[in-house]
Amino acid sequence: MAQYVPPANIRTLTYTTPGVVIHYPQVSGLANPRAQEAINQRILLQLHEMERMQQQVQTGTNPQTTVTFEIKTNERGILSLVLTNYTYSEHMAHGYTIAKGLTFNIANGHAYALHELFRPGSNYQAVLTAEVQRQLQERNLPVLEDSDATVSSDQDFYLADKALVIFYPLYAITPYYVGIPMFPISVYDLQDIATENGPISLLSANIA
């Protein structure tokens, strides 16, 4: 049975400067101030990293950037969110979107990498890769030649309700017009290989 943990308080902060509009989340009211600071700092660091990534991609002039976020899970002590940075600079063929998932334990502020969701030796990468490739075929998604749809230990992901969602950057495995390809996998299908008391186990536990 899942133990009740109050959701984290989330405020939307907005930063604007010529050519830039950033909406980003700030966590407040956590019982552990150090955890709260760690989460908010990690969010800011990720935003700065996404900005640096865009500077390498959008090399035209007069860049225009919009940053937004979505809260995907905020329950049972788990906070999972997605940050999105869309930038277009003049003389480029089109804009570019970067999305990054962050998943936290709100008790201690730890940010999870994908491999931490699964038991050591569980062969989780093969399990997830097989599911991604199955969905590519089932959904008839076009795949770029020589693309690699395997799942890495630091793969982008987020948790949404009762699903682990694996996703890839633009151009990684599918053409630009597909957008960011996302592959939801039920947490109930992953219970046998999930880390005990980890995010997947917590989200798949019965309420009563």
Image (cartoon, rainbow, N blue to C red):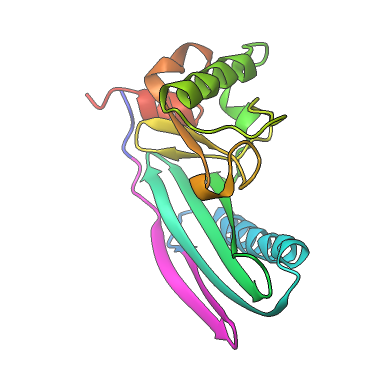
Residue at the (60%, 38%) spot, across then down: 112
Q: Which span of residues is magenta-colored?
A: 5-26
Residue 184, compared with residue 49, is above or below; it is above
Residue in the foreground of this view, choosing between 169 and 121: 169
Name the residue located 66 percent from the left edge and 16 percent from the top edge: 120
Q: Is residue 200 left or right of residue 20?
A: left
Relative to 117, 120 lies left or right:
right
Q: Is residue 205 left or right of residue 165?
A: left
- Taking the magenta stretch, the answer to whether it contains residue 8 is yes
Q: Is any part of residue 14 visible from this angle?
A: yes
Q: Is residue 119 above or below residue 178?
A: above
Question: To which quarter of the image does residue 159 belong?
Answer: top left
Let me know if residue 4 is in the magenta part: no
Q: Give the vertical position of 67 relative to 161 (above or below).
A: below
- Spot occupied by residue 153 in the image (x, y as percentages of width and height): 69, 29
Residue drawn at (53%, 46%) of the image: 180
Q: Nearer the viewer, residue 139 or 22?
A: 139
Q: Position of residue 146 (x, y in %)?
A: 72, 29
Residue 208 percent coordinates (x, y):
22, 24
Q: Residue furthest bottom?
A: 18
- Asked if residue 196 shows in the view, the reply is no
Q: Looking at the figure, which quarter contains the N terminus? A: top left
Percent x, y for residue 5? 35, 42
The secondary structure that dominates the magenta segment is strand
Going 69% across and 28% down the picture, which residue do you hit? 148
Give the mark count: 0
